[in-house]
Amino acid sequence: MTFIEYSAFDPIFMLHHVMVDRSFALWQVLHPDSYVEAEAAPYSTFTTSAGAVQDASSALTPFRHSSDSGDFWTSAEVMTTQTFGYVYPETSGSSASEIQASVISAINTLYGSSITNPSRKHKSRSNSWDMSARSHEPRDSLPASQVYEWITNIVVQKQALNQPFFIHIFLGNFSDSASPTQWATDPALVGTHCIFARAPPNTPSSSSPSASKNGCPNCDQLVSGTIPLTAKLQEDVQAGELNSLDPDDVQGYLKDNLRYRVSLANGTKVDNADVAGLEVKVVSSVVEKAESGVEGVVAGVLEGLPKWGDLVERLVVCSD
């Protein structure tokens, strides 16, 4: 799906959008009182002008019509998948409490700890819901009911290179002299974030930062991504390379070992400094493990899922 013009022809396109739909359906079950809020469009699209207020009654252009007369669906009309005659296994049930319990159980089961999963490497996400597998982790400053989670946050201008590009996060020794086409299989790769972009009309594609300013009204638009680090750090703890996930241990370790690199879809390496707006930071959070045996939602409070504390910025990653 790297190239927008052809992305819908890739079979994974449908799987990707179905997964987004499913994830939102699960989120709705856990947050039944939250939905679309009115907000001004921050930038123009093919059908919306910057500054136009969008709310639940706004037409969902340019997608399929809701009637033969050409009317478009609105968010208010599609609050549930049942509008289109389907539900997901986790969102079916005879009562709201039963469905909520099913969703919480599914999240904890399907997206549980990947610490012992050998297929974790080279994926752009690790899973953090089931904390039970980390009970042996050294904790110098936290009680047994809490753990540290570590995350890489990426921010960059969407049109920084006027074409799709990749940001690769490495932790440990990696072959910087190797071709970018080999980075995907480098043992030090933690994850890769793809920027889904294309050249604006009448603007040549280029790896030069200045090219993104030619006739592009939204070239300063920032996009962001996240690559979790906890699973890889836990592996390093188990390998004896890191003492614990405590900030006193992790911050210095990441400063010495965490790096990022950028490449184009054709495998061309791009200097980090040539990517407009690119910033990579590491944050951490103290996470309270889910209460044991709780599978439901009580008085609107999610009791069956871990509770994340505030995110604390720990490190701006070196760009060398």
Image: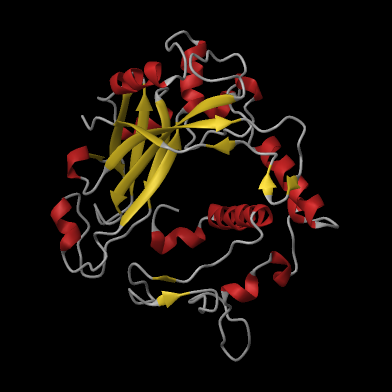
- The residue closer to the viewer here, 171 or 56, is 56
| Residue at far top of view | 240
| Residue at far left of view | 210
Quadrant placement of the C terminus: top left
Left/right placement of residue 188 relative to residue 107 reads left
Q: Looking at the image, which residue is at 20% across and 61% down?
A: 204
Query: Where does residue 23 sit, x and y in percent of width and height?
Result: 61, 52
Query: Where does residue 290 sit, x and y in percent of width and height?
Result: 66, 33
- The residue closer to the viewer here, 230 or 85, is 230
Left/right placement of residue 34 relative to residue 55 reads right
Does 30 appear above or below 126?
Answer: below
Left/right placement of residue 1 relative to residue 270 reads right
Q: Looking at the image, which residue is at 33% across and 68% down?
A: 43
Q: Work out whether residue 235 can be spotted.
A: yes
Coloration of the structure image: secondary structure
Q: Work out whether residue 265 can be spotted.
A: no
- The residue closer to the viewer here, 41 or 185, is 41
| Residue at far bottom of view | 69
Left/right placement of residue 68 relative to residue 246 reads right
Q: Looking at the image, which residue is at 64% across and 76% down?
A: 77
| Residue at far front of view | 299
Q: Looking at the image, which residue is at 51% across and 79% down?
A: 59
Does 273 appear above or below 3?
Answer: above
Query: Where does residue 185 sit, x and y in percent of width and height?
Result: 42, 28
Q: How many marks?
A: 0
Query: Where does residue 75 sit, x and y in percent of width and height?
Result: 58, 72
